[in-house]
Amino acid sequence: QAHMVSKPLLLLLLLLMHASSEVLLEKVGRAGVITINRPKVLNALNLPMIRQIYPQLKKWENDKETEIVIIKGAGGKAFCAGGDIRAVTEAGKAGDPLAEDFFREEYILNNAIGACKKPYIALIDGITMGGGVGLSVHGRFRVASEKTLFAMPETAIGLFPDVGGGYFLPRLRGKLGLFLALTGFRLKGRDVQRAGVATHFVESKKIPDLEKELVDLKSPSADDVSRVLESYQNQSSLDSEKPFVLDKHMSDIDSLSHSLCLLSQTLARMSPTSLKITFKQLQAGAALSLPDVLVMEYRLSQACMRGCDFYEGVRAVLVDKDQSPKWNPSTLEELSDQTVEQCFSSLGEKDLTF
């Protein structure tokens, strides 16, 4: 009897373990549920979390008892505000393999989400940027709410819209994806669905009920999931009368394809190297499969680790927060096409493979 732990104490221990895990992986009914659980840092994604999610996703995909996968963020503010960029920066400077491993394993997870045979439902109720976009946008269903804030702000830190941005962005209507990629423009609420980033819009307060209904489905098909999502969307009229935020700019945006210079004011703050890489990444990505895009993006990620703009961008935006990065080269004109080309070249045996 002496070694028995009292029931309340056991519950407390379990709660503490739960609270400290950065990702919660639970089986609820016929659903595998992933909860990103770092609310204090807006659920930023790090390598240990990727290493927990990936094998579990593969396991659920092959498990006859699991019919759907749901992913959500804890804390009510963010789904996932991005990758843990500061850790990657430190590693890159020190020549630590984390700078290779993080991108490699993150992209392998992005690809697994895109290829998942079971309905994958991302509840992007809150801030969804960078790495958080990679955890959601390649899945079959993405549910936005009025609290959703979507952006791919990488060009401002000397990076490029990765995690498969080269695949999904050029597939948005017109040149909208290119505009979002170059400017880091933020879409909010219903506009995230109108842009084609989310598949559905459901008011935030209805999402817990929606989740319960999804979890309670008996052997659901993708069509069953679709029906439930649509019924909740039909009950969500918030902001439905407001036009799409970029409606009146769409004709200007669609003529972007010819020239980066059109955006010179907005883009003056961005890394010229990032802008040129991103422009070429989206052009190429429009004709590639998701796995091929991720192979290309892995090459680009490593080129950014070798360069200097990424470290300078993180310093200016995230560390010193002086918002005045010194880019090198500092203008688009100084950057040769050859330098850009080199960023896309094969890494030989270090290339990403699936």
Image (cartoon, rainbow, N blue to C red):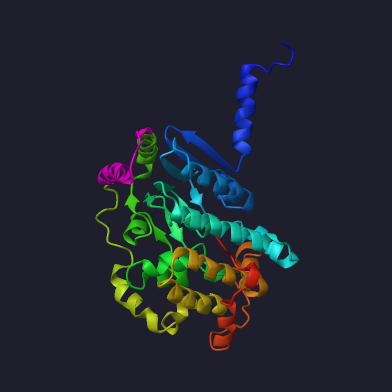
**How many numbered badges does the structure rendering display?**
0
Between 311 and 27, the residue placed more toward the observer is 27
Find out whether residue 34 is within the magenta segment.
Answer: no
- Asked if residue 335 lies left or right of residue 250, the reply is right
The quadrant the C terminus occupies is: bottom right
| Res 195 quadrant in image | bottom left
Q: Nearer the viewer, residue 227 or 322?
A: 227
Q: Position of residue 134 (x, y in %)?
A: 49, 57
Q: Is residue 198 visible?
A: yes
Percent x, y of residue 65 = 44, 35
Q: Quadrant of residue 244?
A: bottom left
Q: Which residues are magenta?
A: 216-236
Q: Quadrant of the N terminus?
A: top right
Q: Is residue 82 above or below residue 336?
A: above
For residue 18, above or below residue 59: above
Position of residue 212 relative to residue 181, above or below, is: above
Residue that lies at the very extreme toward the top in this rendered image: 1
Which residue is at 43% across, 79% downward? Answer: 263
- Relative to residue 188, is residue 43 depicted above or below? above
Q: Is 230 within the magenta? A: yes
Whether residue 122 sits left or right of residue 83 in the image: it is left
Residue displayed at 67% across by 73% down:
306
The image shows residue 351 at horizontal and vertical percentages of: 61, 68
Overall secondary structure of the magenta section: helix
Residue at point 53%, 85% (across, down)? 332
Residue 52 % position (x, y): 59, 45
State the residue in front, 76 or 347. Answer: 347
* Any part of residue 158 in sight: no
